[in-house]
């Protein structure tokens, strides 16, 4: 099969973890070692998208190719893988189980024992392994210490939390990849004049591969930052709207509270009236006339005189003053003594 990017992707997708699969595909990659940088780039891209088990299989494939190259004194793949391996190991260590992490550590130990990569690359790989282990341990400790272990992230914050998690990993990867690029560049600069032009070009190819990896991480970090900003703006707008709605609800509740207070006052007043007994009006006794003579009728002159003057004086005056009666003709008729007569009986001693 001739070399092209699609062919490389097809070969990488066929890796199933068996020794036969890894060895046969490894031989195909070694045959196309002139395209080592392009092949390693495809390998690195596929590693980022692979599942946990496939990540381990791709690490095994890289180990096979790098060790076979080292045994045959070929530098194309060790140098091409050297530019991205530290970042690749760190990425895999962050996304696999503890069991898979242990297998990757054993592979790294073999690389160190057999000097598969340069000292600088091996140091960068060791740093990546330690950084990944410290990050996972620190995250668990922080979660336990803050009392947030087992808590459910609210649905509104899940996307934001995922973006921040990705961003944290990218920042760590960026720092590591940048350091690897600087190390490879320093190595290339130190070899100028002492190494052959071909060796210098090979080292510069490693720098380019590492630099391309850093650029990719930076671009992904920028895109993730944009997502974080979008999430935050959405949260702010949502909370502004919720705040306004809750403020309106608060005003409605105050109105309801006022109505409740009014109804409570009315009910309390009515309850007081219904429980207080009504007082009967006091009984007023009829006036009892004082003891004494009975008051005669107003049209009885003699009786009225007796009342006003007393019985003795009234009796005397009755004898002196005759009773007059007005007759219909308008004349005053006297009974008894005339005007000039004297009644001697009236002077009774």
Image (cartoon, grey):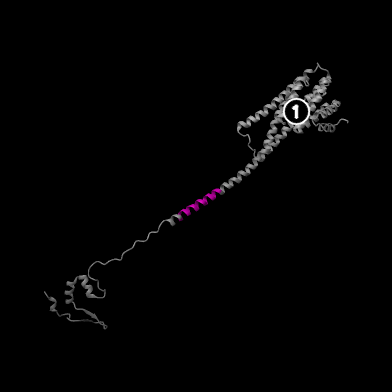
> Which part of the image, by quadrant, shows the N terminus?
top right
Residue 229, position as x, y percentages in the image:
68, 37
Could you say which is closer to the camera, residue 242 or residue 154?
A: 154
Mark 1, Cα crowd under 10 Å, few <14 / some 14-19 / many 20+, is: many
Asked if one can make out residue 177 in the rendered structure from this viewpoint, the answer is no
Can you identify the residue that label 1 sits on? 88
Side of 31 relative to 279 (left or right): right
Q: Quadrant of the C terminus?
A: bottom left
Q: Is residue 323 magenta?
A: no
Residue at 78% across, 29% down: 58
Horizontal arrangement in the rendering, residue 285 relative to residue 69 (left or right): left
Viewer-side residue, 150 vs 299: 150
Pinpoint residue 171: horizontal percent, then vertical percent. 70, 29
Percent of width and height locating residue 44: 78, 29
Residue 290 lies, in percent from the top left, at 24, 66
Q: Main secondary structure of the magenta part?
A: helix
**Quarter-wise, where is residue 275 in the image?**
bottom left
Q: Is residue 72 above or below residue 17?
A: above
Q: Is residue 4 above or below residue 121?
A: below
Asked which quadrant contains residue 329, the reply is bottom left
Q: Which residues are magenta?
A: 253-270
Please say whether residue 262 is one of the residues in the magenta stretch. yes
Left or right position of 136 against 66: left
**Residue furthest toward the bottom?**
329
Q: Residue furthest top?
A: 194
């Amino acid at each position: 099969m001739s070399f092209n990017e699609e062919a490389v992707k097809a070969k990488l997708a066929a890796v199933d973890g068996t020794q036969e699969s890894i060895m046969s595909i490894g031989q195909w990659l070694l045959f196309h070692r002139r395209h080592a940088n392009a092949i390693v780039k495809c390998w690195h891209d596929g590693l980022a998208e692979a599942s946990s088990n496939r990540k381990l299989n791709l690490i095994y494939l890289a180990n096979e190719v790098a060790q076979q190259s080292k045994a045959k004194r070929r530098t194309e793949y060790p140098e091409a893988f050297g530019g991205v391996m530290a970042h690749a190991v760190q990425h895999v260590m962050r996304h696999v189980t503890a069991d898979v992490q242990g297998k990757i550590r054993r592979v790294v130990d073999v690389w160190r024992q057999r000097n598969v990569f340069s000292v600088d690359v091996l140091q960068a790989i060791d740093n990546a392994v330690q950084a990944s282990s410290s990050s996972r341990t620190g995250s668990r400790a922080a979660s336990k210490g803050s009392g947030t272990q087992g808590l459910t992230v609210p649905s509104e914050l899940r996307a934001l939390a995922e973006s921040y998690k990705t961003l944290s990993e990218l920042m760590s990867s960026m720092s590591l990849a940048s350091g690897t690029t600087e190390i490879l560049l320093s190595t290339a600069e130190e070899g100028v004049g002492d190494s052959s032009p071909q060796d210098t070009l090979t080292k510069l190819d490693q720098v380019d591969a590492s630099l391309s990896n850093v650029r990719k991480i930076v671009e992904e970090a920028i895109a993730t930052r944009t997502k974080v900003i979008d999430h935050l703006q959405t949260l702010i707008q949502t909370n502004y709207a919720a705040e306004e709605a809750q403020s309106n609800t608060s005003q409605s509740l105050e109105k309801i509270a006022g109505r409740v207070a009014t109804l409570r006052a009315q009910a309390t007043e009515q309850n007081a009236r219904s429980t207080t007994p009504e007082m009967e009006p006091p009984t007023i006794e009829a006036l009892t006339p004082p003891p004494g003579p009975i008051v005669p009728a107003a049209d009885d002159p003699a009786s009225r005189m007796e009342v006003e003057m007393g019985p003795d004086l009234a009796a005397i005056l009755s004898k002196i003053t005759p009773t007059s009666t007005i007759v219909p003709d308008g004349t005053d008729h006297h009974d008894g003594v005339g005007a000039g007569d004297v009644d001697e009986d009236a002077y009774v001693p």
